[in-house]
Image (spheres, helix red, strand yellow):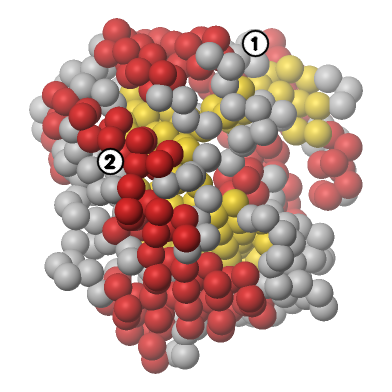
Amino acid sequence: MTQVDPATGILDTTRPLGVYVHFPFCRARCPYCDFATAMREPIPHAEYAAAVVAELSARSGWFRGARAPDLQSIYFGGGTPGLWRPEAIGGAIESACRLFDATGPLEITVETNPGEVTTESVAALRAAGVNRVSLGIQAFQDHLLAAIGRKHSVAAIAAAVHAVRAAGIDNLCADLMFGLPGQTVDDWRHSLDVLVALSPEHITAYALTIERGTPFGALERAGKLQRPDDETVAAMYSAAHEVLQAADFEHYEISSYARPGRRAVHNTLYWTGGAYLGVGASASSFRPLADGTGWRFCNPRALETYLRSAAARKGNPLPAKIERRTAEDLENEGLWLGLRTCDGVDRVAHARRYGRDPLWFSERAAAAEKCVDAGWLSVAPDRLRLTATGFLFADEVSSRLWLGA
Ligand code: SF4
């Protein structure tokens, strides 16, 4: 019987590490949002900070081998972690750096929303060690922001960007969404143009997805959510590629664009099979093992369950889900994640990590050939890569190349 304990097995110490801290609180719930969020007034800043720091301490040993891992990033996601008191964020940063002996420069990101930041609040984050801010801008039309239930206005966006810059943060990521109810291709192009003029270092442009359990999911099932059709959404995706590449952003992952040297370190860890320790309600972790297998596990999603379990078990909450990933699972995932990036899959590096060239399997080689014929995939002696059209069919390509599906 498989031993269901993610602390067992010898850690693969060759992989870099990222720490993810989930802060679940938001001022209000957006009707499309499926993340683990909680509305509490007042926010229990200190109680939540204590739980997160205790969890970092309890689980850091699972991610340390004989020597400290190469900690490369700390990411505060949510929820809206920009609402967390800066001293709480600073405490979590200090703990992670101490527990993993981090001395070098790390990417330390906090997500927040326009309308919820001031120059003073960002300056306090900066003083706590944060060097990257991710702003949930989403659109530059007030009627579209209202349509998706966002609480900020277009006027608040420029003010937020100004606050980030005034506080000395030189690494700004901006999120934009397309495929919104009532959005036209012209609206989308306008949002891209205005955002480019604000000069962020990184842009994430992603399509609205409708999740079943959300108010938008119910509206869609009732036929009351008027969204652009698939062709228009594809045109929006292509417009983002065209506008942002022309503005010297590198399109380095399906939804991600960066100025030279400003790719997201934390997300790159996910796409390249790095280890990650996720703390806080609903946070997921991946602990790769030296034998080529690994553990993936996540914390309880409900805030109260997480806090109760963390307190009762000395900072080590009972995971809500634990999966032992076999070497075959991880090989499939490595290919799937690599194909999300414009670098694609380096065949030599893949063979070094997983023991075989990705096209060694005849079943997959045949599927890859069909994807090449469809114009979705390029196969070179050193690399597999999605084509520009292939990015639109990334899930389809991945499922065809997934062995044992
Ligand atoms: S602000 Fe973000 S995390 Fe919070 S409810 Fe809206 S989409 Fe979800």
Image quarter hosting the N terminus? bottom right
Q: Nearer the viewer, residue 271 or 318?
A: 271
Q: CA distance from mark 2 to mark 1?
A: 40 Å
SS for tag 1?
Answer: loop
Where does residue 269 sit, x and y in percent of width and height? 65, 49
| Residue 142 higher or lower than 172, as above or below | above
Q: Nearer the viewer, residue 319 or 257?
A: 257
Residue picked out by circle 2: 114
Residue in the picture at 64% in, 77% down: 99
Residue in the picture at 14% in, 24% down: 143
Mark 1: give few (<14), some (14-19) or many (20+) Cα within 10 Å.
some
Residue picked out by circle 1: 375
Residue in the picture at 25% in, 74% down: 44
Mark 2: give few (<14), some (14-19) or many (20+) Cα within 10 Å.
many
Where does residue 129 sit, x and y in percent of width and height? 52, 60
Count of picture labels? 2
Q: Give the residue type that dot 2 points to.
A: Pro
Q: Is residue 272 left or right of residue 145?
A: right
| Residue 258 higher or lower than 330, as above or below | above
Residue in the picture at 83% in, 20% down: 380
Q: Nearer the viewer, residue 95 or 298?
A: 95
Q: Give the residue type that dot 1 points to.
A: Gly
SS for tag 2?
Answer: loop
Residue 371 seen in render: no
